[in-house]
Image (spheres, rainbow, N blue to C red):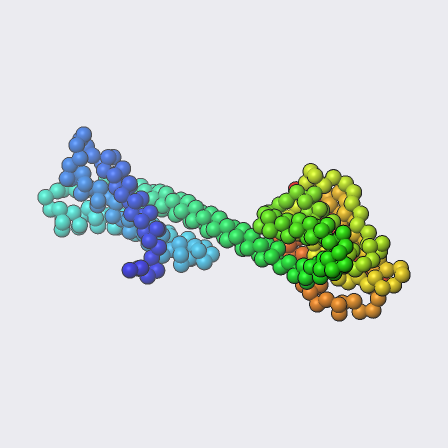
Amino acid sequence: MKLPDINIKKLFLYLVFWAISFYVGLELFSRTDEIRAIDVVYTLLFMLPFVFVVSVHAFHLVPNYLAKSMFWAYGLTLLCLLGTIFPIYNFSYLILSEWFFPQYYLVGNYTPFEVMGFGLLFILISSSLEFARSWFEGLQAKNRVSELETEKVASELKALRAQVNPHFLFNSLNTIYSEALKRSEKAPKLILKLSDMLRYVVDKMDQDRVLLQEEIDYLKNFAELHKERLNEPSKVKFILSGDFNSYKISPLLLLNFVENSFKHADLTEDNAFISIEISTKGKVLILKCSNSFYGDSSLKDKSSGSGIENAKRRLELSYPDRHYLHIGKSENTYHLELKLELD
């Protein structure tokens, strides 16, 4: 059964504190090598006022005044509390000893200021222990919160990665099916590209980081399949430059940005285009996507907006303060630029 308004750990700590204090006092007050009954009684009577004062301080003054920043009330109450120590000290030896231990003649040997000094010392030691306990528990709580946040971010990233648009898969299968009906030599190559892409998604999606070159290969296959589906290969440019073998990146991070250009693009006009440029400068990856559009291309695919928001959220989670993203629209042209500090 849980006791109301009592911190069991705190109570246990204070019991241990007083047990140790009693043992130390017993060793100090013992006049012989062996501990006698009178030594135990004397130590009990000596500790009684300090147990009272420290308990009132810990369980009343600290939570009701100090914790609420009522410093004046805390200070005045503490002074009053310290003033009760010597009367209780005398009461212990003059009255309680006569009531419970009449066989012993016990007298307190300390002055009022010495007793108050002992009381203040006990308060300081017990407060230091309480501070250490609170700090340690706070550190544990902070670590638990940090672990929960890490797990939450990992779960959210996993969910975001899992949101792969199935439309591309269906369109690619339709393209391959059309080529197969024509007995085209392209069909086996397209199947191989799609197979590599699906293997990449299955094998790499749950990893925190993958080789940048693997991500680039996936995007190349993605662009090649789109070229076949659009039947306008000359209007699609996929340009690569830089070192892709020395760095790692979060898997499928760039897909939504590249995919967005193909979704928005209108290649029906003679001067229509899609341009994807990926390069590295040191540890910085630069992705530039642009495409032509005519009319209200936003009506073509309602999932475009959610795909970009997905990618933005992944950037915030995986690369906080390590990326720059600009998305704009000028006359008949969408353009996007991403700069990313790689691992």
Quarter holding the N terminus?
bottom left
Observer-nearest of 130 and 136: 136
Q: Is residue 262 left or right of residue 49?
A: right
Q: Do we see residue 16 in this rendering? A: yes
Observer-nearest of 60 and 183: 183
User: Which residue is located at x 59 percent, y 48 percent?
Assistant: 203
Quarter holding the C terminus?
top right
User: Residue 294, how many percent across, how many down?
Assistant: 84, 66
Q: Do we see residue 322 in this rendering? A: no
Q: Could you say which quadrant of the image residue 67 lies in?
A: bottom left
User: Residue 133, how many percent across, how many down?
Assistant: 40, 47
Q: Is residue 69 left or right of residue 24?
A: right
User: Which residue is located at x 19 percent, y 46 percent?
Assistant: 93
User: Which residue is located at x 28 percent, y 41 percent?
Assistant: 21
Residue projecting furthest to the left: 103
Number of marks in the image?
A: 0
User: Residue 326, how many percent across, how many down?
Assistant: 76, 55
User: Residue 145, how many percent across, how many down?
Assistant: 50, 53
Residue 327 to residue 102: above or below: below
Residue projecting furthest to the top: 33
User: Which residue is located at x 45 percent, y 58 percent?
Assistant: 68
